[in-house]
Image (cartoon, grey):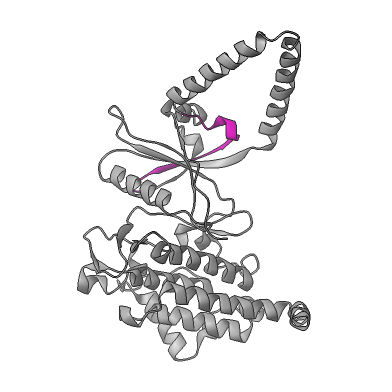
Amino acid sequence: MSYDTEPKVLLLSFEGLVSITNNFSDEYLIKETSIAKMYKVKISSSQLFVKEDDKEDGEKDGEEDDKEDDEEDGEKDDKEDDKEDDEKDDKEDDEEDLFDIVIRRSTNGRQHREMNNDLMLSLYSRHTNILPILGVFLEDDAMHEVIIVTKYEVNGSLDKHLSDPTTLTWIRRLRICVGVARAMSYLHYGLKKQSSVIHGNIQSSRILLDDKWEPKLYGFQYSIVCHRQQLCLTSKYEGTIQYMDPAYEKTGGLTLKSDVFSFGVVLFEVLFGRKASIVNEDKWYFAKLAKRHYEETILDHMIDPVLREQMDTQSLDIFAKTAYYCLNEQRAQRLNTHEVVERLEEALDHQMKYENPVRFISIYLLC
């Protein structure tokens, strides 16, 4: 099942965030972008500080319960013993349950609006392959900012592993691409009524990988909610240039197929083991390079030999053809994300059969 249940997002106190980051000290700073500073902190689940009014309500309820318990004859001592045992267990659980979080902090103005957009659309889009939000601090009259807390994904972003065919094997690359395609299909077709989310900035650096190499799409700062079949006119499209839909310059608007083009660039990055680049100020140099190598049937010139040795031929052919049709300059000729998912799943299926032929023969004979 790809769809998550209703998310439990905590409203966090600013004081609590200041406490766990030592007043947003640079010792915890891991990255700074044009719209936010990101801090990495190791905490336990009990250290996610909720707003004071919620905390006070909980304490008040707890005091009333304790009072009632103390009035019961013969149970007071037992209650105190149980409490000590619970505190000991909680302490042990906290020590075992430590995990890393990322705190993204932005200030007012344009950056604040982009973070707000990221927050709203991340909450709106709940899927196994979309990065979940653990907690937020929302702006108030004194501090015009939004702070978003997410889990730190230990394997970082996809772009950091593209050139490593040993760690990022072909079958692992296929699984990652299938996961991202499913997230995109959910954004485009899995929401209520006829609404869709155009991500607007899909690229390999916006795909995080957890401890099991499961992908988590994030980065909704420039995303748009629109009617599924409409061209969405916008002046805020600020996606990374080499992933940008070339049809935007002609139309001034985005469609679901704009994300498909960007994902096509990512698919060729995964295949070639290198990030998309700009050469001689040509925004679409990498996309043109990929298409030319596909059309001239010389993809092997761009694929790492170690990675190529791992590939099933049918898996490679299906994957490359899928990526190629995502890059069509005419939006109408591009695949939709349902089709992308189906074809990538087929490529993965061929690779699994190639790597585990005995298992698949056994399954076939049992059917």
Residue 57 shown left or right of residue 334 in the figure: right
The quarter of the rendered structure image containing the C terminus is: bottom right
Residue 333 shown left or right of residue 152 in the figure: left
Q: Is residue 45 magenta?
A: yes
Q: Is residue 178 magenta?
A: no
- Residue lying furthest bottom in this view? 296
Above or below, comparing residue 45 to residue 364 in the picture = above
Give the camera-side residue of 351 and 85.
Answer: 85
User: Residue at 45% across / 86% down in the picture?
Assistant: 293
Q: Position of residue 253 (x, y in %)?
A: 24, 67
Residue 100 appears in the picture as rendered? yes
Total marks shown come to: 0
Residue 272 appears in the picture as rendered? no
User: Residue at 25% across / 41% down in the picture?
Assistant: 109
Above or below, comparing residue 80 to residue 219 in the picture = above
Above or below, comparing residue 69 to residue 185 in the picture = above
Q: Position of residue 26 (x, y in %)?
A: 46, 35
Q: Position of residue 95 (x, y in %)?
A: 68, 33
- Start-end of magenta stretch: 34-50
Give the camera-side residue of 277 and 39.
Answer: 39
Q: Position of residue 316 (x, y in %)?
A: 57, 82
Residue 318 shown left or right of residue 309 in the figure: left
Residue 215 shown left or right of residue 279 in the figure: right
The quarter of the rendered structure image containing the N terminus is: bottom right
